[in-house]
Image (cartoon, rainbow, N blue to C red):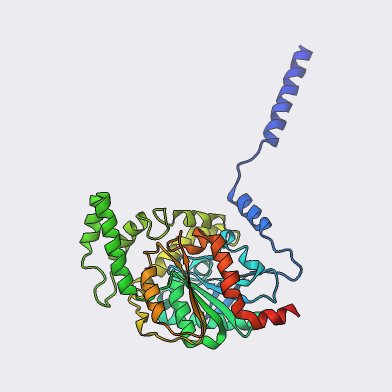
């Protein structure tokens, strides 16, 4: 009996030890810690900052990352409005940081900046004029904080509107302006997107899509803002047919990748889509009335990164506008396997293009850095 009880005791002890040592479920905290460790900047003198900055009277969040502070600075203006790039930058940006000091900024009403402020106070301030003023103030802060007379600004989608306005108003602050998913003529882009999407739906025999699209016709006529509900019907089916992300039916992969952001807390994640919605409601319909056809000259170099399959913000409309533009230098880089999310769809070519096409435009700074 004593031997039997001893055997039972040993068995229970072994089971208890096994349970104690059993692998626990892999959590978001584990994943983000692994990503943060893999991309940790360990080069002596490197920059790895995540902080609040006072811009436009409120706290706004930036990340600043780079291997060498002598490198030129690149500020990315995210799209949307509200479609933040900081929380997916872990995927596409690490290589950039060897050649640039990269600044990601969660704009007013978006991402971590949305979380850090009272929406009841901030959302009413989200006008196009205020967002332009914030962008100008942010560039001034970056130049001062990082000790650079000039920087690169990369504007994606909605951010390409802010970026082009910066290039118009403050060309002396920029080595160059880089437009990705460039907004050139919003109403024409919307009309072409609607027509393309209807054609895809008809070819597909998709009666629901055809009905939805025809219900908002005539679409984007004149310069009157498209009602947001109509815009979302168009986007629903445009995304479905790969007009936003080539070969995919929407930005679901990018949205899921936000969950792995080391910069974002659980509270940030819980509210990120609230900020996205608030930004769209405040800004999207109005900005899509923008027509830059009267902008014929810019006084800084301009580069466009255009996805060949971008229907979301028409790359063909952007290319037509760019053909007429005069600038000290200009170049289009076409991404043949991308639609609107170029940096995520072709991250390798994006890096090569930044290094080979963009970075040399900071030649004076690179010479100084090499001394």
Residue 20 as seen in the image, left or right of residue 200:
right
Q: Residue at x 71, y 79 (%)?
A: 369
Query: x%, y% of residue 281?
Result: 36, 69
Q: Residue at x 48, y 78 (%)?
A: 163
Q: Residue at x 24, y 57 (%)?
A: 212
Numbered label tally: 0
Along the viewing direction, whichever of 254 and 198 lies nearer the viewer = 198
Q: Quadrant of the N terminus?
A: top right
Q: Quadrant of the C terminus?
A: bottom right
Query: x%, y% of residue 155?
Result: 49, 73
Asked whether the viewer can see residue 127, the reply is: no
Along the viewing direction, whichever of 230 and 310 lies nearer the viewer = 310
Residue sitting at the far top: 1
Q: Residue at x 42, y 57 (%)?
A: 246
Asked whether the viewer can see residue 263, the reply is: yes
Query: x%, y% of residue 10?
Result: 75, 23
Residue 19 as seen in the image, left or right of residue 229:
right
User: Does residue 201 sit above or below 369 in this rendering?
Assistant: above
**Quadrant in which residue 2 is drawn:** top right
User: Does residue 283 sit above or below 203 in this rendering?
Assistant: below
């Amino acid at each position: 009996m004593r031997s039997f009880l001893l055997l039972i005791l040993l068995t229970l002890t072994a089971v208890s030890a096994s349970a104690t040592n059993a692998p626990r479920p892999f959590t978001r905290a584990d994943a983000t810690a692994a990503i943060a460790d893999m991309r940790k900047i360990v080069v002596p003198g490197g920059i790895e900052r995540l902080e609040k900055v006072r811009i436009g009277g409120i706290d706004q969040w930036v990340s600043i990352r780079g291997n060498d502070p002598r490198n030129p600075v690149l500020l990315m203006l995210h799209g949307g409005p509200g479609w933040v790039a900081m929380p997916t930058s872990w995927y596409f940006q690490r290589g950039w940081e060897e050649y640039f000091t990269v600044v990601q900024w969660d704009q007013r009403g978006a991402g971590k900046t949305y979380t850090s402020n009272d929406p009841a106070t901030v959302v009413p301030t989200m006008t196009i004029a205020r967002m332009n003023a914030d962008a100008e103030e942010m560039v001034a802060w970056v130049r001062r904080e990082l000790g650079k007379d000039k920087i690169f600004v990369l504007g994606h989608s909605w951010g390409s509107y802010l970026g082009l306005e910066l290039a118009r108003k403050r060309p002396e602050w920029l080595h160059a302006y880089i437009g990705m998913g460039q907004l050139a003529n919003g109403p024409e882009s919307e009309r072409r997107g609607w027509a393309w999407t209807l054609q895809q739906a008809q070819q597909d025999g998709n009666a629901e899509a055809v009905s939805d699209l025809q219900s908002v016709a005539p679409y984007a006529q004149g310069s009157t803002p498209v009602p947001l509900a109509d815009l979302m019907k168009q986007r629903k089916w445009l995304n479905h047919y790969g007009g936003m992300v080539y070969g995919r039916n929407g930005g679901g992969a990018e949205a899921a990748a936000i969950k792995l952001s080391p910069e974002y807390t659980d509270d940030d994640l819980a509210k990120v889509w609230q900020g996205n919605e608030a930004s769209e409601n405040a800004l999207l319909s109005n900005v899509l009335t923008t027509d830059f056809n009267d902008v014929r000259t810019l006084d800084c170099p301009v580069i466009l990164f255009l996805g060949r399959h971008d229907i979301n913000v028409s790359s063909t409309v952007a290319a037509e506008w760019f053909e007429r533009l005069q600038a000290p230098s200009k170049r289009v880089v076409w991404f043949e396997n991308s639609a609107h999310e170029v940096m995520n769809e072709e991250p390798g070519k994006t890096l090569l293009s930044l290094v080979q096409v963009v970075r040399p435009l900071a030649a004076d700074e690179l010479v100084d850095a090499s001394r």
